[in-house]
Amino acid sequence: MGKVAFVFPGQGSQQVGMGKDVYEIYPEIQEIYHRTDERLGFELSRIIFEDEEKLNLTQYTQPALVITSYALFYALKKSRPDVVPSYTAGHSLGEFSALVASDALNPVDAVWITHIRGKLMQEAVPEGAGKMAAIIGLPAEEIEKTLQEISGIVEVANYNSPEQTVISGETEAVEKAMEVLKEKGAKKVVPLAVSVPAHSSLLRDKAEEFGKYLEEIEIKDAQIPVISNITGKPLTDAGEIRKELKEHFYSPVRWVQSVQFMVDEGVDAFIEIGPKKVLTGLIRRISKGVNLINIQTLQDIQKI
């Protein structure tokens, strides 16, 4: 058998009630939720389990996904201590969950810092000034070349799969790029239902502010290599991780490169830990023939 990687989803995978079965079974997970509620100064647990409207606001979505992914990861570790990953990785926000799973971040710190991250991202650009769009069916190289011809700020935000690349930036520039890319043969051009132009240079100033908050939490060397969204290569050093998390704010997510690196290193099983199956779908398009497992509930863990 080859190697296993644990992967963690990012924003957009949230759903009300996620992780509640784990919360109800494990007192130690209830304790983590209570500690994070105290640290945040509001009941994140209530938002996750009951309040869909708030859950979909970036400042709550981000910490909610991190704590849910941690709860599922904890349950998996308890039930199957023999399943040990060679690597962890997360898509965008999911990188924080990957760092918790690799013991680089404490779960309470990770939840707190991603709440701050969500707030800063929301504040970075006035409502309506930023936009994101998924471009489907056009090679990333062609998209990169086209974006250089568009006036204004529009950049690649996510290299999600060979068929799907996400662009981000100023509303007018993104809309112009969508038109041009459609003309150049994109099969589909889909505006995303987000108000923040994530992973674009529009967030660079807020990254500086975020860096100051990062100084308030402990970051340790990762015990399991975490694949960087920025480089698609392993991260273990605490100093490099701190630098990564700041630059991560405005740098593109190289998910295709990250998955390909792990496959080239012998990973043939990916376990997605978190709600929905977004990464499972993307990995299937990046590398045929790997084993894909998705863990959203205790029942999913029992099936492994």
Image (cartoon, helix red, strand yellow):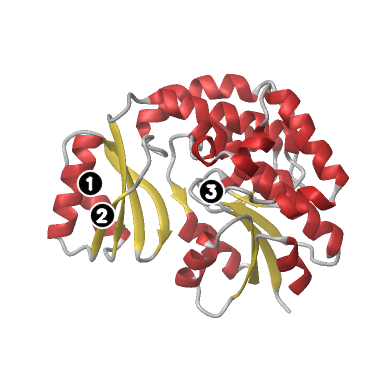
Instruction: Determine whether 270 is above or below 228 in the image.
Output: below
Q: At numbered mark 2, what does the secondary structure look like: helix, strand or loop?
A: helix
* 185 relative position to 303: left or right: left
Q: Which residue corresponds to the image point at 53% horizontal and 31% vertical from the top-left?
A: 59
Q: CA distance from mark 3 to mark 1?
A: 25 Å
Q: Amino acid at mark 3?
A: Gly
Q: Nearer the viewer, mark 3 or mark 2?
A: 3
Q: At numbered mark 3, what does the secondary structure look like: helix, strand or loop?
A: loop
Q: Amino acid at mark 2?
A: Ile
Determine crowd level at label 2: few under 14, some 14-19, many 20+ residues with C-alpha closer than 10 A. many
Q: Are marks 1 and 2 in contact (CB under 8 Å)?
A: yes
Q: CA distance from mark 3 to mark 2?
A: 23 Å
* Quarter occupied by residue 214: top right
| Residue 284 appears in the figure | yes
Which quarter of the rendered picture does the N terminus lie within?
A: bottom right
Which residue has dot 2 on it?
Answer: 143
Q: Which residue corresponds to the image point at 41% horizontal and 55% vertical from the top-left?
A: 159
Q: At numbered mark 1, what does the secondary structure look like: helix, strand or loop?
A: helix
Which residue has dot 3 on it?
Answer: 10
Which residue has dot 1 on it?
Answer: 147
* 144 relative position to 97: left or right: left
Mark toward the start of the polypeptide (3 vs 1) = 3
Q: Nearer the viewer, mark 3 or mark 1?
A: 3
